[in-house]
C-alpha cells in the first residue's frame, strides 16, 4: 500500500538543510507533500506562494515530492491528503522536546498519524531559516546555506 507523508514547515526560506531532509525522506516514502504553513500571525519574509515557488525550484528531480501551502492544523492537512506520516528534521537534541510534544498532539488529533524524525546531516546542524534571513538582511553571504533560487530571491528583497 502506498504511503503518503507530509513535511510541514514555514520554510521561510527553504535551506540546504531542508533540501537534504526531503531528499533523504523521498527515498523512504511513495509520495511526500511539503506542506508550507501560511500562518497570518507569523511575520514571514516571503509570502506563502513565493515560498511554494522557491521550494519547487529548489527540489529539482524529486518526482515524488509535491508542494502545497495550507492554513490551520497540520493534522487536519495530513488527514485531508490521506497522509499517515509527518516528517520532521532534527538538528540537535534541543529540537527534540518541542518536536516530541508536537508529535504527541498530532497523534491525539489524528491517531493514524506517525511522526518520523530525520536527523540533519552534520554540516547542517547549525542551520535555520531564521539565521539565514538575519545573515541575508545584514548583507552576509548565504550561498553555502540555501539553494541558488533562494539566494537570488533574498538578494532581490535586500535591494527593496
Image (tube, grey):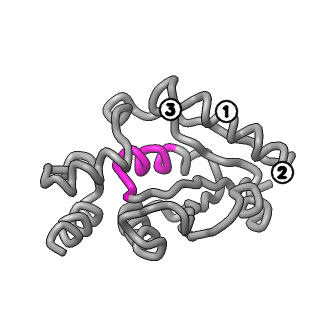
In front of the other: 2 or 10 = 10
Q: Can residue 103 be seen by looking at this rendering?
A: yes
In the visual, does 105 lie left or right of 36? Answer: right
- Residue sitting at the far top: 93
Q: Decide which of tag 1 and tag 2 comes sooner along the chain.
A: 1
Q: Quadrant of residue 82?
A: bottom right
The spot of residue 83 in percent (x, y) is 74, 57
Q: Secondary structure at mark 2?
A: loop
Q: CA distance from mark 3 to mark 2?
A: 24 Å
Residue assigned mark 3: 119
Q: Could you say where residue 35 lies in the image, as x and y percent from the top left? A: 58, 62
Residue nearer the viewer, 15 or 105: 105
Evaluate if marks 3 and 2 touch, with contact meaning CB atoms under 8 Å apart: no
Q: Quadrant of residue 9?
A: bottom right
Q: Can you tell which mark lies on residue 110?
A: 2
> Does residue 64 show up?
no
Mark 1 highlights which residue?
Answer: 100
Amino acid at each position: 500500500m502506498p504511503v503518503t507523508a507530509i513535511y510541514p514547515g514555514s520554510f521561510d526560506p527553504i535551506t540546504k538543510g531542508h533540501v537534504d531532509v526531503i531528499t533523504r525522506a523521498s527515498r523512504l516514502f511513495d509520495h511526500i507533500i511539503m506542506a508550507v504553513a501560511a500562518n497570518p500571525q507569523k511575520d514571514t519574509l516571503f509570502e506563502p506562494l513565493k515560498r511554494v515557488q522557491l521550494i519547487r525550484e529548489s527540489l529539482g528531480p524529486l518526482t515524488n515530492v509535491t508542494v502545497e501551502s495550507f492554513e490551520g492544523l497540520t493534522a487536519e492537512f495530513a488527514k485531508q491528503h490521506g497522509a499517515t506520516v509527518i516528517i520532521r528534521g532534527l538538528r540537535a537534541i534541543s529540537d527534540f522536546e518541542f518536536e516530541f510534544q508536537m508529535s504527541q498532539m498530532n497523534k491525539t488529533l489524528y491517531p493514524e498519524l506517525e511522526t518520523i524524525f530525520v536527523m540533519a546531516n552534520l554540516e547542517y546542524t547549525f542551520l535555520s531559516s531564521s539565521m539565514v534571513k538575519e545573515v541575508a538582511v545584514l548583507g552576509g553571504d548565504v550561498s553555502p546555506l540555501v539553494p541558488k533560487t533562494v539566494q537570488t530571491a533574498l538578494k532581490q528583497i535586500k535591494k527593496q
